[in-house]
Each structure stands twice: as C-alpha cells, then as structure tokens.
Image (tube, rainbow, N blue to C red):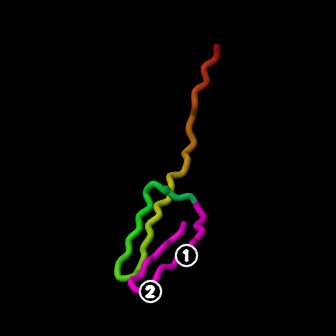
Amino acid sequence: MTVKVEREGKGTFTRQYTIGGKYDLAQVQANLELGILTLTLPKAAEAQPRTIPVQVG
C-alpha cells in the first residue's frame, strides 16, 4: 500500500506500508479527516471446505 499526501504550502510526501494477511482489497475504504488517515481493510472470507460429487462412468 502506498499513501500519498499533499499539504497546502508544504509539498507532498509518500509513505509505503506492507500489510500482511488476507484482505478483501475490493472493499478497502480510506477516509482523511482533520489530518488523520483512516483505512478500513475487511478480512477476506476464508475458503470453506465443501464436498464435490464425482460421477463415475
């Protein structure tokens, strides 16, 4: 993940973080309010075991 912030009159800076784990990247949300960046990264659904019928013949 790379975070880029622009500040009025003070230029820009970029910071990059590596986040471990399994997240649903399609559902990531970011909010910047009063200079605080809040990221919401929901966990991805775990794969559930299932039975797959096998046809013989």
**Magenta highlight on residue 30:** no
The image shows residue 2 at horizontal and vertical percentages of 53, 69
Tag 1's secondary structure? strand
Residue stretch in magenta: 1-21
The residue where tag 1 is placed is 15
- In percent of width and height, residue 34 lies at 35, 82
Q: Residue at x 46, y 82 (%)?
A: 11
Q: Residues within 10 Å of mark 2 (few under 14, many from 20)?
A: few
Q: Is residue 26 above or below residue 40?
A: above
Tell me the residue at 51%/79% (across/down): 13
Image quarter in which the C terminus is found: top right
Depth order, front residue of 21/14: 14
Quarter of the image where one finds residue 39: bottom left
Looking at the picture, which amino acid does disc 2 mark? Lys
Which residue is painted at 35% across and 78% down in the image? 33
Contact between marks 1 and 2 (CB within 8 A): the answer is no
Q: Quadrant of residue 5?
A: bottom left
Q: Residue at x 58, y 31 (%)?
A: 52
Single out the residue that lies furthest toward the top.
57
Residue under label 2: 10
Q: CA distance from mark 1 to mark 2?
A: 16 Å
Place of residue 6 in the rendered image (x, y in percent of width and height, measured from the top left): 43, 78
User: How many numbered discs, if any?
Assistant: 2
Where is residue 36 shown, x and y percent of the image?
41, 80
Question: Which residue is nearer to you in this view: 25 or 50?
Answer: 25
Q: Is-magenta flag for residue 18?
A: yes
